[in-house]
Image (cartoon, rainbow, N blue to C red):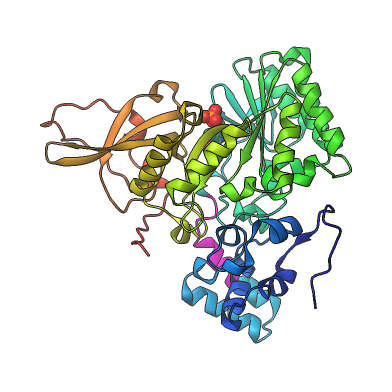
């Protein structure tokens, strides 16, 4: 059965029900398709007509980077796991039995990295404020109750658990407690509206969350950021969606209220900026007075080449956007499949950074967003006999840790913070000033797995 065609500018999501039909666009083996379907039982799959028709090069599947970015691939799960699920599905096992097995596999994929589940709900005026995560002194994250999905899912998403209903969505919240919290916290300058993708909400619903922040009592909130992948996965959000104009009008109101509105755009690959629709969407957002900052993780097989980052950052600058973070993939989900060793991520960053003009060098990275803060890999050094990583907190729960270089033992295979070990005896045992974060017993290792996949 062909996937039903919809007018190109009407949002049409595809899920696991359409997966097999979509996979037949390429000459993949029956076995590949069966195992990819098994993976989609475990990890969330959602894409849409624009991604499928405009971003994926079907002649290059399964190696195409945009395909790898959005479609399940057999190797994302250990062989034994995917064969087990594939067999259960093929033998029409009862749903309950399949779900049991699937839940077991999910639990082994570290579904809640870096305290994602234990977001402690802060209090304001003696009341709980769900949806608020007071991440850094000046920065509050807000998860609106509505808006906990996306126009398409990235296969590496660190929030994958919430898309399979495995995370408690009660952490999300409404506007009123947020406003109460912000009134109590004049030190907060930045509110980050995140999700899911907040721009999955209609303009009217989004306005219910954003407009209260423009209140005169919240003048200290100078910046409102909205994190989104919609500029890439569904640019029609800003062009032809029924409420596109209303959305842009909301952006204008925020700017007119004297606040800095930042669209934090998730772009993983320069191809996402290659369509006329993508370029026009950027132009329209910028026209409102909002600024756009560009960030993404380094993902093996998707964007693990310096040339792609050079293109991404230079196209961004050309379109008036500001390169922001290059992240390291978090320790969750199919991390082993996508992970790039830290030293390789740093080489990619450095080589790309060296190729762009100063305006592209607003990019920082590679960055690990860990529980204690954001750790940037600044490079490697050889001191005497010892090779070390040079690290630095770009953000920390402890403001005093920010911006001080510190060292960890070099490990060519390390892919995440929890695998790094402090350097204590370099420089002949001289006491080494180090931010405490890395050395609180158990703090670095507590959340992470210690898998060390070799190069594949
Ligand atoms: C980066 C980041 C932020 C925002 O920090 P900035 O450095 O101000 O952009 C907030 N929360 C998390 C989890 C982050 O990784």
Looking at this rendering, what residue extends furthest in the right direction? 242
Q: Position of residue 441 (x, y in %)?
A: 33, 39
Q: Position of residue 338 (x, y in %)?
A: 47, 57
Nearer the observer, 310 or 100: 310
Nearer the observer, 145 or 292: 292
* Residue drawn at the location 66% of the way across and 56% of the way down: 55
Nearer the observer, 347 or 257: 347
Quadrant location of the N terminus?
A: bottom right
Image side of residue 217 versus residue 373, left or right: right
Q: Position of residue 322 (x, y in %)?
A: 57, 30
Q: Position of residue 354 (x, y in %)?
A: 39, 35
Q: Is residue 155 visible?
A: yes
Q: Is residue 30 above or below residue 183?
A: below
Q: Quadrant of residue 98?
A: bottom right
Q: Which residues are magenta?
A: 101-112
Q: Is residue 44 magenta?
A: no
Quadrant location of the C terminus?
A: bottom left
Q: Quadrant of residue 104?
A: bottom right
* Residue drawn at the location 44% of the way across and 29% of the way down: 394
* Residue drawn at the location 77% of the way across and 16% of the way down: 257
Q: Is residue 170 visible?
A: no
Q: Is residue 310 above or below residue 434?
A: below
Image side of residue 76 versus residue 150, left or right: left
Looking at the image, in which quadrant does ligand 1 appear? top right
Q: Is residue 373 above or below residue 414?
A: above
Image side of residue 5 versus residue 178, left or right: right
């Amino acid at each position: 059965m062909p996937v039903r065609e919809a007018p190109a500018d009407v949002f049409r999501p595809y899920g696991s029900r359409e997966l097999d039909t979509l996979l037949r666009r390429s000459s993949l083996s029956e076995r590949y398709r069966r195992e990819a379907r098994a993976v989609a039982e475990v990890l969330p799959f959602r894409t849409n007509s624009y991604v499928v028709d405009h971003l994926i090069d079907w002649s290059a599947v399964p190696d195409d980077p945009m395909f790898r970015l959005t479609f399940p691939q057999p190797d994302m799960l250990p062989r034994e796991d995917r064969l087990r699920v594939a067999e259960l599905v093929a033998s029409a096992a009862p749903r309950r039995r399949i779900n049991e097995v699937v839940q077991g596999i999910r639990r082994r994929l570290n579904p809640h990295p870096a305290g994602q589940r234990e977001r402690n709900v802060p209090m304001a005026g003696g009341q709980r404020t769900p949806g608020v995560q007071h991440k850094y002194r000046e920065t509050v994250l807000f998860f609106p109750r509505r808006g906990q999905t996306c126009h398409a899912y990235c296969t590496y998403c660190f929030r994958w658990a919430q898309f399979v209903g495995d995370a408690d969505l009660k952490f999300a919240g409404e506007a009123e407690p947020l406003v109460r919290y912000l009134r109590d916290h004049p030190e907060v300058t930045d509110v980050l509206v995140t999700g899911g993708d907040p721009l999955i909400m209609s303009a009217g619903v989004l306005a219910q969350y954003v407009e209260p922040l423009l209140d005169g009592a919240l003048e200290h909130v100078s910046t409102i950021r909205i994190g989104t992948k919609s500029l890439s996965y569904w640019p029609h959000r800003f062009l032809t969606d029924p409420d596109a104009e209303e959305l842009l009008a909301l952006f204008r109101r925020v700017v007119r209220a004297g606040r800095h509105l930042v669209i934090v755009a998730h772009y993983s690959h320069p191809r996402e900026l290659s369509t006329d629709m993508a370029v026009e969407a950027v132009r329209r957002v910028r026209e409102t007075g909002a600024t756009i900052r560009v960030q993404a993780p380094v993902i093996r097989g998707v964007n693990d080449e310096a040339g792609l980052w050079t293109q991404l950052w230079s196209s961004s600058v050309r379109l008036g956007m500001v390169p922001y973070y290059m992240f390291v993939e978090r320790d969750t989900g199919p991390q082993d499949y996508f992970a790039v060793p830290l030293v390789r991520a740093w080489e990619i960053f450095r080589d790309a950074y060296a190729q762009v003009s100063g305006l592209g060098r607003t990019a920082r990275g590679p960055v690990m967003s860990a529980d204690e803060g954001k750790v940037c890999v600044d490079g490697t050094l050889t001191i005497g006999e010892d090779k070390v990583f040079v690290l630095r907190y770009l953000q920390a729960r402890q403001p005093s840790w920010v911006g001080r270089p510190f060292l960890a033992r070099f490990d060519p295979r390390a892919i995440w913070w929890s695998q790094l070990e402090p350097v204590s005896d370099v420089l002949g045992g001289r006491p080494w000033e180090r931010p405490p974060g890395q050395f609180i017993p158990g703090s670095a290792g507590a959340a992470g797995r210690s898998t060390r996949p070799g190069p594949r």
